[in-house]
Every structure is written in structure tokens, then in C-alpha cells.
Image (cartoon, rainbow, N blue to C red):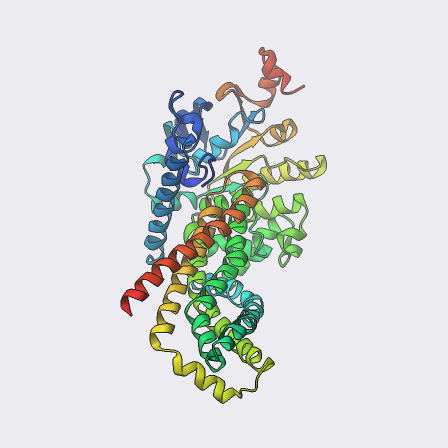
Amino acid sequence: MTEMEKILVEIEHLKKAFGSKNVLMDINLRIKEGENLVVLGKSGSGKSVLIKCMVGLIEPDEGKISVLGKCIGDLKEDELNQVRKKIGFLFQSGALYDSMTVRENLEFPLRELKSKKEEKDQLVVEALQHVGLEEAIDKMPSELSGGMRKRVGLARTLILKPEIILYDEPTTGLDPITSKEISKLIIEIQKKHNTSSVIITHDVECARITGDRLVIIKEGECVAEGTFTELQSSKDEWVRSFFE
Amino acid sequence: MNPQPIVGPEAEKTPELKSPDNAASVFQPHSFPLYRFFLEVTLLTKFTARYFKEVLKPPYEFNELIRQCYLIGYKSFPLVSVTGFIMGLVLTIQSRPTLAEFGAESWLPAMVAVSIIREIGPVITALIFAGKVGSGIGAELASMKVTEQIDAMEVSGMNPFKYIVVTRIAAATIMLPALVVIADTISLYGAYIGVNLKGDVNVHLFLSQVFEKLAFIDVLPALIKTLFFGFSVGLIGCYKGYNSNKGTEGVGEAANASVVYASLMIFIIDMIAVQITSFMM
């Protein structure tokens, strides 16, 4: 790592337990500017808990998380909300507000933005164009397919032009073609906006397409780190088995 | 209160409360219903305190409040109207034989009116409201929790408590008194029909008999207590839904618990209100 590389997220000795179950044991991670970091791991290995800790949705038991130079655990509610506006979060299910139309869903994060309605409308249309769904603008979430919901969720994530995007299982529950489209969209977004991303997945194809660097979590600990090719030819049989 | 592990954001902030697994292996306080009752009361009190803190703090969500008033109030109007009409009609028909025994049939409009305005109208309407609105709020919020919609609001830098909880509780508090006034009015109309099923009383006579016996002290306390009924229905629905964390099973539980505890609260508040009113009179 060169000295010029800016670190956007730094996680040190992160620990989290739910009851007697230790979910994260001792996680140490750094995410550089413009980098796509893929976190691979089996279901229940604590991947989603990790990114929820990064946005302050879950409070860690121990450890330190710095995002954009701010220690998440030390921030007051208003300060945390300011940091959160610079982080996009794509939820596994899309988490669209089902009582609102697609347009209202996208307008929701813009509510506190002091700009004219026309400007906000323009932002909504641009975000939908970006994910190729401008025709769905007046539809309700219940009228959308799984892939479309993910795309709308992604558009809502992008609308505030975040510096970091956290993807929670972006391809889960999608067919292989749509999965590939979503993976390519993640790459496009990174290139266009120079965002840094953390992609939580157990989809190896998605990891191959999107990941600059991969981390594998096993029983709450990072057991391997490297590029896709490096991990594919790892000496550790368990790590290799992920790619077979 | 049922002996389930405490889950949700309140428990997340209080790790020692969230699961029986966290308790010492020898002593598990969560297995004691009384402990769980006090725990639930403590969490509900914190939730209420947060509501009062957030309701006064700008920015105010007026648009969402108006939308909720429409959904909670206007959409409950048909159900409350039908119930109110039947309430007045049935009460009149049932009361007539007893009054007739004492030769006091002429007291029927006044007696029914006082019963409706003071007690039956507010309580029955609040119970109907708890069944329709309380369960709806509980299920909606629990469903939003399960599908990560509340988390999505939080990570977008918004305050979901203010947007979702404050507006619903405020709308329930505002709309229930309005619905009770409507239900009481329609109920009196039902009573008028009931009186005329076996008699011949014109509207003027009916109304003069009603208002002759109705005093300000009958109307005002009844309306004030409906503010508390509405608040408790909104509060319990929101509390149960917002803190639900057990998947789709939690949605059903939140809806059910919202109705049960809101109904119980209505009776408790009514009992206290009656004591206070009696003292004042």
C-alpha cells in the first residue's frame, strides 16, 4: 500500500456477540479509496453484521471502526447521520418502502436537501436512468420483480452520491443473468463515481466480477485475503473449496 | 406479559436484556414473569420519553402526519359510524323494558345519551380503534422492521422514529377524539330510531330531553380521556411493531399484542378517568 492511498474505512479488532454466540471474533480491515472489497463467507459467518456495524446499525462489543476519518462509536446521533449520508447501503431485499412509489422511494433520502423540486425530480430520473429503470418511476414496489427491486434499491443508494457503498448480498435470490447484470452495474458505478465498495456475498461469480480484493470470513475471523486469482489457488483447502 | 426474550433496538442498546443466553447460567431473571413485566414497563417508558423528546424537536413531519390522520382517522370512519349507530339503537332497545317497569320511559333519551357520551361511546369507539388501528400500526411497523425498511431509513441519515413513530402516535391521539364525537352523534341518531320503534317522539323533543340532562362535566372529561385512549393505542402499536425482531412470526405477535395491551390500557385509563371525574363532581 503506497502512502498516497487514502483509507476510507478502517476496522480494528472488531468483536460482536449475540448472546452466547460470538459472531465476529477479531476483524481487522482497511478499505482504500476507489476499491471494491468483497467479503466472502458462508451464511451466518457474520458478514452482514460486519457492514451493519460499519454504519452504526449494530453496536460492536469491542473494537474501533473509522469511516471517512470519523470513529463511528464516538459520534453523536446528528454526526452519525451526517456520516451515513456519505455511505450508501444496498440491503439484501432492496428494503424499498412498500407504501411509497418508486419515485417517492428515491425522493425520500433527498427530503433534507435544500434544492428545488425540479432539481430533485432530475436527480430521481438520473438515478433511475443509471440503473435502466426510468419506466418504473410511478410503480409500487410490489409491482417490481426481484431484480428490479434491487436496481431501484441501488438507485436510491446512489441518489445522494455516496463515497462508500455497502452491498449486502446484492445477487442473492436472482437468476444467473440478472446476477451478472447487477455485478456489472456495481463495477459501472464504481468506475463512474469512483466510489469505494464493500460487497458482502457468497456468490463466487459476483466476487470475481466485482472484487479488486477479497476477504474470506470463517467463524467470525478473516482467514484469507487477496485477489480472486490468489485465493482461487490458495494453499488452504477450505479457502479453495469456496471457488470450486 | 408473555415470557419471550426481549428483542429489537431497545434490547440492542441494553445487551444484558436482549436474550436469556446473556444471563448467568445459574440465575436467569428472564424466566420470571414479574421481572419481564417490569422490564417491558421500563422499555415502554423509555420509548414514551423518546416520543416526547422527538415530538417537540424540529423538523416536523407535517405531510406524513396529515397522511396518517387520513389513514387512521378517515379510513376508520365507516366502521366507527356503523358501530356507533348499532350501539345507540341496541342500548335504547335493551333499556326500555327496565325503565318501562318503573314508568320512566320518558327518561329513555336522557339516560341513553348520558351513557353514550360519558362512557359507552368513548370506550367502545376506542376498543374498535385499537382493533383496527392498533393492530394495523403494530403489523405495519413489524413488517417494516422485518424487511429492513426502518434500517434503510436510518442508514440514509433520516430519523425513522420521528417519521414513523411520532406521526402515527400523534395522528392516533388527534383522530380518536374526532371519531368519538362522530360515533356519539351517530349513536344518538341510533337512539332516536330506537326510541321511535315503540313510541312517537319527535326530533325536537328527543334532543331537548337529551340536552336537558347533559352537562358540560359529562362531555369534557369524556373527550379528554379519548386523547389518552388514542395516545395509548398509537404508542403501544408503535412500541410493539418498532421493537419486533422475530421475522414474520413477529409481525403477527406485534399485531396481536398491540390490540391486547391497548385494550387493557383503555380500561385502565377509563378506570382512572372515572375516579378523577367522580372526585371533581
Question: Which of the pair B194/A71 is nearer the observer?
Answer: B194
Residue A234 visible in the current orientation: yes
Residue farthest toward the left in the current orientation of the protein = B280
Q: Which residue corresponds to the image point at 52% horizontal and 58% vertical from the top-left?
A: B133
Report the quarter where the N terminus of chain B lies.
top left
Q: Would residue B267 appear left or right of A43 to someone viewing this image?
A: left
Q: Which residue corresponds to the image point at 45% horizontal and 75% vertical from the top-left?
A: B111
Q: Position of residue A105 (x, y in %)?
A: 55, 54
Where is A175 relative to B224, above or below?
Answer: above
Where is B275 relative to A97, above or below?
Answer: below
Question: Which of the pair A94/B148 is nearer the observer?
Answer: B148
Q: Position of residue B69 (x, y in %)?
A: 48, 65
Question: Which of the pair B187/A47 is nearer the observer?
Answer: B187
Q: Which residue corresponds to the image point at 65% horizontal and 49% vertical from the top-left?
A: A132
Q: Would residue B199 appear left or right of A136 to someone viewing this image?
A: left
Q: Which residue corresponds to the image point at 28% horizontal and 65% vertical from the top-left?
A: B279
Question: Which of the pair B201/A191 is nearer the observer?
Answer: B201
Q: Position of residue B101 (x, y in %)?
A: 50, 75
Residue A191 visible in the current orientation: no
Report the quarter where the C terminus of chain B lies.
bottom left
Q: Position of residue B2 (x, y in %)?
A: 47, 39
Where is A155 relative to A103, above or below?
Answer: above
Q: What is the count of numbered marks? A: 0
Where is A48 relative to B103, above or below?
Answer: above
